Amino acid sequence: MGEMLQQGLRPDKVMCHISFCQLSDSLSGKCSHGYVLRNGLEGWDTICNAMIDMYKKCSQPEMACIIFDNMSNKTVL
């Protein structure tokens, strides 16, 4: 997602979701998480689920739990 922002593109909720699914390092994940918060996209279940998955992959389960706890519509799989 960082490359998109550098090119002046503004990712929508679909691109954010795809970006989170591809991230495997915590620095890029935190930057993308910040983008989601700054642009009001944290209310989308699919984006929250992708962030939870990304943080688990990056060995940061505490961040995954924080996101889950703050979700307004918790889903069970």
Image (cartoon, rainbow, N blue to C red):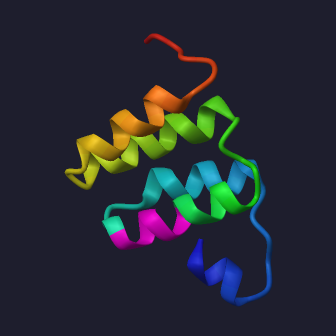
- Residue 8 placement (x, y as % from top left): 79, 85
In the depicted structure, whether residue 70 falls above or below residue 21? above
Task: Establish if 1 lies above or below 20.
Answer: below
* Residue 55 included in the magenta stretch of the image: no
Image coordinates of residue 32 in percent, x first then y, are 55, 64
Going by the picture, which residue comes out furthest to the top?
76
Write the residue at 45% across / 29% down. 68
At 38% across and 49% down in the image, what residue appears? 54
Position of residue 14 in the picture relative to residue 34 (left or right) = right
Total residue callouts:
0
Quadrant housing the C terminus: top left
What secondary structure predominates along the stretch shown in magenta? helix
Front in this rendered view, residue 69 or 32: 69
Q: Residue at x 43, y 71 (%)?
A: 28
Relative placement, left or right, of 43 versus 1 is right
Q: Which residue is depicted at the point 35% across and 34% down?
A: 65
Q: Which residues are magenta?
A: 27-32
Q: Quadrant of the N terminus?
A: bottom right
Q: Quadrant location of residue 9? A: bottom right
Query: Is 28 inside the magenta-drawn segment?
Result: yes
Quadrant of the image occupied by residue 46: top right
Q: Determine the residue located farthest toward the left in the rendered image.
A: 59
Q: Is residue 14 above or below residue 74?
A: below
- Whole-percent x, y for residue 38 in the image: 70, 62
| In the rendered image, the vertical position of residue 24 relative to residue 10, given as above or below | above
Q: Is residue 69 left or right of residue 55?
A: right
Residue 3, horizontal then vertical, whole percent: 61, 83
Closer-to-camera residue (27/70): 70
